[in-house]
Image: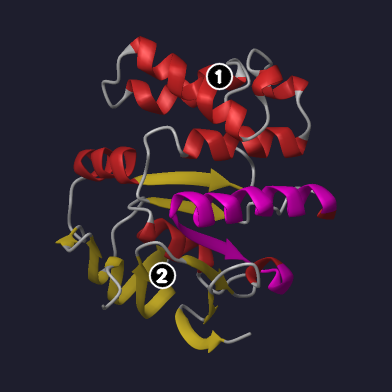
Amino acid sequence: MSKKIIIELKNVWKTYQMGEIQVHALRGLTLKVFKGEFLAIMGPSGSGKSTAMNMIGCLDVPTKGEIFLSGKDISHMSESNLAQIRGRKIGFIFQTFNLLNTLTAKENIKLPMTFQDIQSEDREKKAEQLLEMVELGDRMDHKPTEMSGGQQQRVAIARSLSNSPEVVLADEPTGNLDSKTGERVLDFLKRLHKEKGTTIVMVTHDRKVAEQSDRMEYLKDGIIVKNLKR
């Protein structure tokens, strides 16, 4: 049985105008993400990794090319429509955590659910379950400033799952953590993939981190230049 493609980029270009100069962040990127896989995209600084992540995550539209999410062309959608798709189908984990310091861990996790019209009681229950899952049940009412970096990243993982997304995108998820804490965060992502079958796309510059995935693709100068086999 053939694997189901959940995200596909076809000949995607992204060009930025910097004064009189055109900068091509992506130069015809073609990539398939299969349902249930753990994919790592590697590459040096300036290779286009973050731009590729923005395309995969419906955070931006391409200058040229096509992007399909579950078979639907999203290349030219409006920002409001893209926001709806992001909210329903994609969870994000960022290197800088992106938690709101004025909210508790539980409130941070509940926030994405409020935009999807989920009932208050259900939001409360789901947030508590997710914090228990990342072993932070005792930190529900703590704010990010009262937590370590590793704890904040685990809250961010829990938040990324709040709307039961089909795909979780992790942008350098261990980048701001020490090696031991980073390993623990990676263990959570691997568990999420193995036990729940969540599709994970992770961007990293670290070969050791990338090797935790099922598949590694190497990005350079805005295109995939090689598939890294282990």
Q: Main secondary structure of the magenta part?
A: helix
Way the structure is coloured: secondary structure
In the rendered image of this protein, does residue 113 appear above or below residue 20?
Answer: above
Name the spot of residue 163 as percent of width and height, x first.
37, 34
Q: Residues within 10 Å of mark 1 (few under 14, many from 20)?
A: many
User: Quarter of the image holding residue 175?
Assistant: bottom right
Residue 69 position by quadrant: bottom left
Mark 1, mark 2: which one is toward the viewer?
A: 1
Where residue 4 sits in the image (x, y, percent)? 27, 69
In the visual, does 209 lie left or right of 148? left
Queried whether the magenta region covers residue 194, the answer comes back as yes
* SS at circle 1: helix
Q: Amino acid at mark 2?
A: Glu
Determine which of the numbered discs, if any, sits on residue 20 in the image: 2
Q: For marks 1 and 2, give the CA distance.
A: 47 Å
- Magenta residue span: 180-208
